[in-house]
Image (tube, helix red, strand yellow):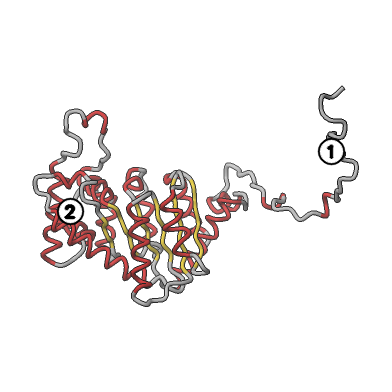
Amino acid sequence: MSIYEDDLRPLDLDDVKTYPLASRPSLVTVKDFAKPVSEDSSLADFLNSLPDILAVNSLRELAERIRRAHGLQKPIIWGIGGHVIKTGMSPVIIDLMRRGFVTAIAANGSVLVHDAEIAMVGSTSEDVDATLGAGAFGAADETGKLLNKAAREGARNHIGLGEAMGRALVELNPKHKDFSLLCAAYANRVPFTAHVTIGADIAHFHPSADGAALGETTHTDFRLLSEIVKRMDGGGVYLNIGSAVTLPEVFLKAVTLVRNLGHKLSDITTANFDFIQSYRPLTNVVRRPTADGAGRGYSITGHHELTIPLLAAELICKQ
């Protein structure tokens, strides 16, 4: 005997309405499934074998929008953080630059550090835990001298920090320049803007650090990036890759500056690539700039060393 009241009974299921399974529209069908690859499959075969579902579908759509921007001669801006360099993606991005799929680069301060060190000695990314206790973290002499000398010369010449760093590196003719985004952008006349947060990078506590020069040149680069963002109207693309705070904030301010000055900014595409989706990139890159019909935003979750080569393959193999 139940302890509940006599009129409290489990709901009767006899009159539940059902429908034939075949009559229902479904979101996933077998035609969308992945296909096995064989030992002699080509790269195009592999790309075509991927399931036409979720992230793969987003990546394919994004690649198509990048190809469209290329055809329209609209900006394709790659906003990158230092982790992109440290995961070995520079050769892939340089190749895409030469193919016209990277028309501008916006970088945070750590990109300047890691890219310059790769160019000069072919290695970067120190063991922080092993050096912090002794106060040796970030004390590489050549890195600090190069960045701060470039900032001072950039301020004297009224150019941005990114261009100044590219010029300084190219003049050094470093052994590993073929792996440097700064060198490639400078050689190919691709705008490279640098957006430093003073105090956040190792070169800012070097004996030669010049806050005024760093501030002036990075402000020039903010204005230059804003001009490039203005030109995105009508089909341009902005990719945020591996920057969770600095570049999403910079991009949002560039967007609002462009619109504040009365310029239309619609039909744009934005995307955030990272191994986790954080608040600022999702809000400041993917959602807000494309709101109210102004464009389309994408979120691609995964490690850069996997997602960027996949995007490159989609761009190159399906032209």
Q: Residues within 10 Å of mark 1 (few under 14, many from 20)?
A: few
Closer-to-camera residue (112/67): 112
Q: Is residue 161 left or right of residue 298?
A: left
Residue 257 vs 316, above or below: the answer is: below
Residue assigned mark 2: 173
Q: Is residue 70 above or below residue 86?
A: below
Sequence-wise first label, 2 or 1: 1
What quarter of the picture does the N terminus occupy?
top right
* Residue assigned mark 1: 11
Amino acid residing under circle 1: Leu
Q: Position of residue 15 (x, y in %)?
A: 90, 45
Determine the residue located farthest toward the right in the rendered image.
Answer: 14
Task: Give the CA separation, mark 2 to mark 1.
Answer: 79 Å
- The percent position of residue 61, horizontal first and vertical second, equals 54, 60
Contact between marks 2 and 1 (CB within 8 A): the answer is no
In this orientation, which residue lies closer to the viewer: 96 or 147? Answer: 147
**Circle nearer the viewer, 2 or 1:** 1
Image spot of residue 288 (x, y percent): 45, 61
Amino acid type of disc 2? Asn
SS at circle 2: loop
Quarter where residue 248 is shown: bottom left
Q: Dot 2, how many residues are within 10 Å of its Cα: few (below 14), some (14-19), or many (20+)? A: few
